[in-house]
Image (cartoon, coloured by chain):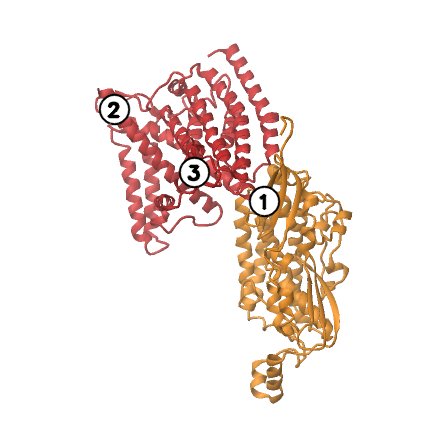
Chain colours: A orange, B red
Amino acid sequence: MGPHQTTRTVLNMGPQHPSTHGVLRLLLELDGEIIVKAEPDIGYLHTGIEKQCEDKTYQQVVPLTDRVDYLANLSNNLCYCLAVERLLGLEIPPMAQWMRVMLTELTRISSHLVWLGTHAMDTGAMSVFLYCFREREDLLRIFEMFSGQRMMTSYFRVGGLALEPPRGWDQPIRAFLDAFPEHLEQYEGLLTANPIWLLRTKGVGVVPAGELVNLGVTGPMLRAAGLAWDIRKAEPYSAYDRFEFEVPTRTEGDVYARYQVRVDEMRQSARIARQALDGMPSGPWAADAPKVVLPDREKMKTQMEALIHHFKIIYEGFKVPEGEVYQAIESPRGELGYYVVSDGSAKPYRVHIHGPSYGNLQSTARMIQGRMIADVIASLGSMDFVLGDVDR
Amino acid sequence: MTFFVITLIKAALWAAAILLSLLYLQWIERKVIAHVQLRLGPSRVGPHGLLQPLADVMKLLLKEDLTPAGAHKFLYLLAPFLAVSLALVPVVVLPFGPEVEVFGVRTALHLADLNIGVLFLLAVTSLGVYGTALAGWASNSKYALLGALRSSAQMISYELPMAIAVVAPLLLANTLSLQGLAEAQGGYYGGWIPRWNVFQLPAPQIFGCVIFLISGFAETNRVPFDLPEAENELVAGFHTEYSSLKFASFFMAEYANMITSCAFATVLFFGAWQPLWPEAKGSGYFPTLLFGLAGLVALYHGLHPARPKDRITLPVVALAFFGLAAVFLIPVVRPVLLPVFWFVLKAGSLLFTFMWVRATLPRFRYDQLMAFTWKFLFPVAMVNLLATGLLVAVYGK
C-alpha cells in the first residue's frame, strides 16, 4: 500500500445495534466517517405471518395481523378486515365505522409518538423519548380498556368490532385529547427550534419526490417531499370521507421535513379523533350477518339458530366467496395493503401484505451514500420503519 | 516531620472525598436525569437507591474481564489505567480553601501549591486523550477505533479554545498558581458584588467563562459533544470492548474529568472558595441556614408523610441535616468547612448544569462539532483574549 492510498473500512452495523430499530443489518463501506456504499440487509425478523394466514380461518387471521406492524396494530386489523369485508360484501354499521376511525387515528398518534421518541433519542435527546412514552402509556391504557390488551389488541374483526365498547369509554379519550395538544407543544419546544436539532436534520437524507415514488416510498416520507398523497383522501375507506382534516405536506424532503409532517399529522389525527368522539353515532357495533359475526351470549343461550351459528363459526369459520381483493389504507407509515385471495373455503388461499416499511426502507442507500455515520442514524430514524412490517 | 503527617492526612482525606464523590456523582446524575424525565431513578438498593453505587461496583467487580481476540494486550491494559490515573491527578492542585489554622497547626487546604498549577492542570488533563486513543486502537474493533478517532480529534481541537479562555483570567490575576488565582478574586465591589473573574474589572470574563464551559463539555465527552461514545451511532465508542473493572475505570475517569472541569472553572472564574457575599455581612451563616431549611422541609414532609415509611425515614434525614447545620457553627472547624462548602457549592452547581444539559440536548454531528470549535469558538476565544489584554494594559490592575 502506497503512502497516498486510503483504505476503506467495511462496518457491519446491526443486526445487533442500538439504533437499527429492531434487527436491520447495514453494511457500510466507510472512507473515514464518510459512507461510500451502503447496503441494507433484511430478513432477520422473518415471522412467516403471510404463510401462517393460509392455515387459519378468516377470523383467526386477525390476531396475526397485530404482529405485522406491532406499533400500528389497529391499522393492520382494519386493513385486513376491510379486505375480507369487501370479499363478503358486508355493510358495516356507522357506529363501528366511526369507532374504527377514532381508534386507528389514536393508533397513528401512538405510533408517531414512538417514532418521535426514538428518533430524538437517536440524535441524543434522551428526555423526549420518555415524555413521548408517558403520552403513549395513556393511549395503551385506552386500547386496553377497549380490548383487554395493550398492544396486540385485535379489536377490529370481520363484521365490526370484537367487543362492545365498555361503559364510559369516552372519558379517558376526551381527557387524552384535551391534554395532548399542549403536551405536543412541549415536545416541539424541545426540538423544533433547537439549533442542534436543526443542524442534525435540515438538508439531511434528501431524496426528490420522483425518486421516492420509483423506490416505492409512501406515507409521511412522500408527503415531506411535496406529494400530498394520502389514501384517506385519495380513496376514502371506512367513513373517512365524512371527517374534516388536512394532509400536512412539506417540500424540502429532508429529515426535518419528515419530522414536521409527522408532528402535524399527530395534530390532524387528534382532530379526527375529536370529531369521531363528538359525533359518534349510536347503533349496533357489528354487522347484522349471523353467519359471520358471533352472536351475543344472551342469544346463544336462548336461541337454537344462534347456537348453531356460533358452533359453525367457531369450528369451521365462515366461507368467503371466491375472488381476490386488494385493500389499501393509510397506516402511520404509509400505504398498507392487504391482498386477499379466496378459493371459496373458510381459509384464505393467499394473504399478501404490502408493508409500507418495506418500500420506505428501499430509500436507505440513496439517502446516506456520501454522508457521515451520524446521518445514517438520523436518516434511519426519519424513515420510521418497523422490521416486523418489512419481513413479515 | 509534621509536614509529612499533615500531608498524609490531607492526602487520605482528599482521596477518600474524591473517590466517594465519584461514586455518588453517578448516583446523583442518574437521579437528576430521572427526575427530569419523570422517572424515579435508582430506588431499589437501599433507601432512595443510596447503595446503588456500591451494588454497581460489586457487579462490575464480578463481571468477566474480557480481552478481545487480536487486541494489543499491553496497550489494551494500559489505556484504562492511564485514563483513570490521569483523571485523578489534578485534584492535587485544586485549591479548596485558604491557609487555615486547625488545632494550632497552620496549613493550606490543598495538597500542593505549584507555581505553575494552571499549566500542570492543562497538561495533565490533555494527557487524558491518550487513554481514549489507545483504548480505541488497542481494542481491535471498528466501533472502538471510530470512537477513538472522533475523541482524539475532538479533545485536541477543544483544547485550543479552552487554553485560550484560561489565559484571560491569568492576565487579570497575573499568576499561574491556582492558589494565587483564588486569592486574587477576593474582595467585593461596593461591598456586595464579588470580585470573581466573571465580574472582575476592567475585563469581566463572561465570554471566557462560557467558552471554557463549552470546551469543558467537549473535553469530558458529554452531551452535546458525546460523539466518541454516541451509543446510537458507535455502540459505546472507544470503550465498546471493555468490560468489568476496566470499563469502570473509563467510567470513573469520565466523572473525575467532569469534577476537574467544574472545579477548574470554579477556580478560574467563580472565585474558588470566596463566599458569594462578604463574611462580615453574615455569609458564614449561610450553610447553617441552608441545611437548617433542608432539615425543616424534610421534617415537615415526615410529619405529613406521603408513604407510611416516610414517617420514620424523613425525620432521620432531617436530623442529619440539622446535625450538618450544627457542625457549621462549631468555631474550631468553621475555617476549614466554610471555604470547602463554598467551593463544593459552586462546583456542584456547575456539575448540575452538566447533568441538566445531558438530559435536554441532542448531539452534534462530527463535522459540525469541528466547524463549531474552529470557526466559532476559537475566534471568539481569541477576541476575548485580545480584548482582555488590551483592557488590562490600558486600565491596569
Side of A225 where A59 appears, left or right:
left
CA distance for labels 1 and 3? 26 Å
Q: Quadrant of the N terminus of chain B?
A: top left
Residue type beneath disc 3: Phe
Question: Where A156 sits versus B325, above or below?
Answer: below
**In contact (CB < 8 Å): disc 2 and disc 1:** no
Residue B233, image x and y in percent?
A: 56, 42
Q: Which residue does the numbered mark 3 point to in the structure image?
A: B251
* Numbered disc in front, either 2 or 1: 1
- Is circle 3 on the same chain as circle 2? yes
Q: Earlier in the sequence, mark 3 or mark 2?
A: 2
Q: Which residue does the numbered mark 2 point to in the structure image?
A: B6
> Considering depth in this image, is A362 or B186 the residue closer to the camera?
A362
Residue type beneath disc 2: Ile
Q: Can residue A192 be spotted in the picture?
A: no
Mark 3: which secondary structure? helix
Residue B204, image x and y in percent?
A: 50, 21
Q: Can residue A98 be spotted in the picture?
A: yes
Q: Quadrant of residue A251?
A: top right
Side of B48 where B142 appears, left or right:
right
Mark 2: which secondary structure? helix
Residue type beneath disc 1: Asn
> Considering depth in this image, is B78 or A300 the residue closer to the camera?
B78
Res. A12 mark: 1
Side of B301 where A324 appears, left or right:
right
- Is circle 1 on the same chain as circle 3? no
CA distance for labels 3 and 2? 31 Å
Graded by Cα atoms within 10 Å as few (under 14), some (14 to 19) or many (20 or more), the crowding at tag 3 reads some
Residue B239, image x and y in percent?
A: 48, 38
